[in-house]
Amino acid sequence: MVLAVKTVNLRIGYLDEEEEKIQWAVRGVDLEIQEGESFCLVGESGSGKTTLANAIAGILPPHAVTQGKVYIFDKLVVDDSSRNYNGVRGRIVNYIPQNPGTSLNPFLTIEDHFYYVLRDLYKYDKSKSKSIAIETLSKVGLTSEILDYYPHELSGGMKQRVLIALALASNARIIVADEPTSSVDASLRAGILGLLSKLNKEYRVTLIIVTHDIKMTSAICNRTAVMYSGEIVEIGKTSIILQSPKHPYTRMLMECVPILGVEKPLKPLPGEPTRIFEDISWCSFRERCPYASVECKTTPSMIPVGDDESHFVKCWRFHEVA
Amino acid sequence: MSEEVIKLERVTAGYKVVKGALSIWKQVNVVLRDISFSIGKSERLAIIGESGSGKTTLLKVILGLLKPIKGSVLLYGRDIYRIPDEEREKILRKIGYVPQDPYRSLNPVLKVKTIIGEPLEVIGENKEKIEKRVVEVARFVGLPWSALDDTPEELSGGMRQRVLIARAIIANPEILVLDEPTSALDVSIQAQILNLLNNIYSNFKPTMITVTHDLAVAQYLADRVIILKDGCIVEEGKLEEVLYNPRHEYTKTLVSSYLYTTTTNSVSGFNNKS
Ligand SMILES: Nc1ncnc2c1ncn2[C@@H]1O[C@H](COP(=O)(O)OP(=O)(O)OP(=O)(O)O)[C@@H](O)[C@H]1O
Ligand SMILES: Nc1ncnc2c1ncn2[C@@H]1O[C@H](COP(=O)(O)OP(=O)(O)O)[C@@H](O)[C@H]1O
Ligand code: SF4
Ligand SMILES: [Mg+2]
Ligand SMILES: [Mg+2]
C-alpha cells in the first residue's frame, strides 16, 4: 500500500500579534492516509480542521508556524519551519474551497479557467485544454455548453462541479475539500457527495473531506478522524465511529445533531473550546467533559479501542463511556 | 382552526430592477408567485426552499417591508398594505424578527445592550425599564452579563445569534419570525439555539415562522411546513406528512438527500443531478 499523506508530530500555529504569542491550531498530529482512501475530518469550528487540511493542500498562509513533518506521497513538503510544495500543490494535491462562488474568477469564462490552470501546470495550449475541459466536465455531469459561461451564470451546485472538474483536469491524486456542501442546498448535497465519491471509487483519487457535520461522513468516507482543540481525539472506520463512538466528545457531537425522521432531544455541549497558547499537560477536553477525573490531569495517548484494529481514542476513561 | 394571525391571499411580489446600465426602463423581477397560506395563533410554520427560492422575500412581505405587486397580506385580519401607516406600525410591533446571518445583521458600532433594547426605545419606553428588561432577556437567552457592554464584533456566532433573539423577544412579540436561525452556526451551537427557541415557544407560545433550508432543523421548530420552489408553493402540510409522503418531485429529492447522508454508505442510488 502506498501512503498518500503522512504527518509526523505536526504542529501548526498562528502568531497572535496582539498577545505576541503563538496560538496552536494543530497540536501534534500523527496521521497516515493511504492512497485511494476517502477520509473525513470532523470537529467544531476552531478545532483546527481547515488548518490541518491546508497544510496537506499546501496553502497555509505565510504567517503560519510549522513544526514536525508532512509527506505527500514520498515528498517531504513540511520539514519543521521549511515548507516546499513545488510540484505538489495544484498538481498532486488539489484543494476545493468552502465557497465555490468566490473561488472562481468572475471575469473568466469556464473554458479560460481550464486554460489558465492547465497552461500553468502542463504548458497546454488552448485546444488541448479545451478538450480536457470537455472530458472532465462530462465526468462531473456538465456539458460543454457551459464552457462559454461566466461563473455568475452558474448555480452553486454547478460551480462546485466546475471546481471538482478543474481538480480532475489537473490530474490531482489527492483532493482536499473543505466543507464541500456547506454552501450548496440540501437538495444538491447528495449530488456533490456522490460525485466526490465517484472520483474516489472510479479514479482512485484520495479524498480528504473537512466538515463540521458528522452525519455527512457516513455517506462517503471510509475513515473518520474527530478533531478537538487541535488534536485528533478519535480515529477509525466511519461506521464504527458512528455506531460506537468512544471519545466523550464524539458522543456529545452526535447527540447534538438533528437527524431527519428521528425525534430526540438535542443535547448541546456546554461551553466553548478553549484557544491554546501554551503546551498543556492535561486532557484538552477536560473542562467540558462529564467523565473527567483525576487521571485526566495528564494528556492521554492514542489508545487502541480493541473493537477494530484501526480504531483509536485519546481518552483515559473510554471504557467508562457507555 | 384557531384565530388566523397571518393570512396571505394570492400574493405576487418582486423587486424593481434597472435593466442595463444606461436604461431608464424599470422592470420587475417577480420572485414570489401567487402565494396563499394562513397561520393560526401559536402555530409553528417552517418555510423551506433552496437558496434564491424567495424565502427571505416572503418574510419581507409579511414584515411590511415589501409591498406585493398583487394580492393581500392580512395580519390579525387587517390588510397591512392598505391601512393607515399608524395602524400598520401598531400591528407590526407585535412581530419579533431575527434576520438571516448573525455576522452581518448587527450594527458593529453599538453596544450589545443598546442593540437589544432598541425595540423598546423606539416605542418610547423609559430608560430604567429598558435596562431592567435588557438584563432580563439577556439572562433568558443565555448571554453572559459581561457581553452586554461589548460590541458585536467581540462575540462568537452563537452569541451574536443570542443577541438577535434577545432583541426580537424583548417587546413580548405575539409573532416570531426567524430567517435561517442556525445555518451559520456549528452543530453544537445550533443545538443550543434550537433548544433556546423551543424554550421561548413553550414559555410564550408565539406564532412562529421559521425559514430554513434544513428539514432536520424544521423538525425542532415547526409542526407545519411550506416548500417553496422558484417562488411558488409546491407542497404544504404537516411535517410528518411531507417527510413520509412527499408528493412533489422537488420535495422527494430533498427528503431523499437526507436519507442518503444519514443512513447509506453506498452511492448506488446516485444520479447526476446538478
Ligand atoms: N433587494 C433585492 N433586490 C433585488 N432582487 C433581490 C433582492 N433581494 C432578493 N432578490 C432576488 O430575489 C430572489 C429570491 O431571493 P431571497 O433572498 O428571497 O431568497 P432566499 O430563498 O431567502 O435565499 P437564501 O436561502 O439564499 O437566503 C433572488 O433571485 C434574489 O436575487
Ligand atoms: N490564517 C489564520 N491566521 C490566524 N489564525 C488562524 C488562521 N486560520 C485559523 N486560525 C485560528 O486557528 C484555529 C483553528 O482554525 P481552523 O483551522 O480554521 O479550524 P476549523 O477549520 O476547524 O474551524 C482558530 O482558533 C482560528 O482562529
Ligand atoms: S481523558 Fe478524561 S477529560 Fe479527557 S476525554 Fe477522557 S474522560 Fe474526558
Ligand atoms: Mg474551517
Ligand atoms: Mg434568505
Image (cartoon, coloured by chain):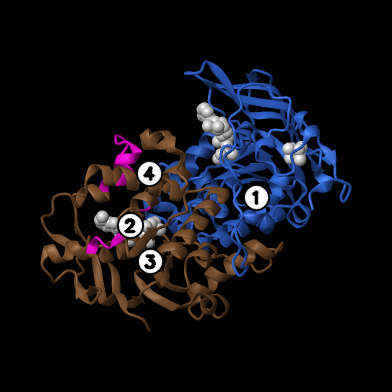
Chain colours: A blue, B brown
Residue holding disc 4: B135
Element at badge 3?
loop
Measure the alpha-carbon separation of dots 1 and 4: 31 Å
Question: Which quadrant would the N terminus of chain B be assigned to in this image?
Answer: bottom left
Around disc 4, counting alpha carbons within 10 Å, would you say few (fewer than 14), some (14 to 19), or many (20 or more)? some
Disc 2 and disc 1 on one polypeptide chain: no
Quadrant of the displayed image that contains ligand 4: top right
Residue B106 within the segment the image draws in magenta = yes
Residue B195, given in percent of the width and then of the height, sits at 52, 57
Residue holding disc 3: B206
Disc 3 and disc 2 on one polypeptide chain: yes
Residue A262 within the segment the image draws in magenta = no
Q: Is residue B16 above or below residue B43?
A: above
Image disc number at residue B97: 2
Q: Is residue A174 above or below residue B84?
A: above
Of callouts 4 and 3, the N-terminal one: 4
Residue holding disc 1: A253
Disc 1 and disc 4 on one polypeptide chain: no
Q: Residue at x 41, y 46 (%)?
A: B138
Hey, what amino acid is under mark 3?
A: Pro
Measure the alpha-carbon separation of dots 3 and 1: 30 Å
Circles 4 and 3: CB atoms closer than 8 Å: no
Q: Residue at x 79, y 41 (%)?
A: A313
Give the residues drawn in magenta, as a range: B92-118
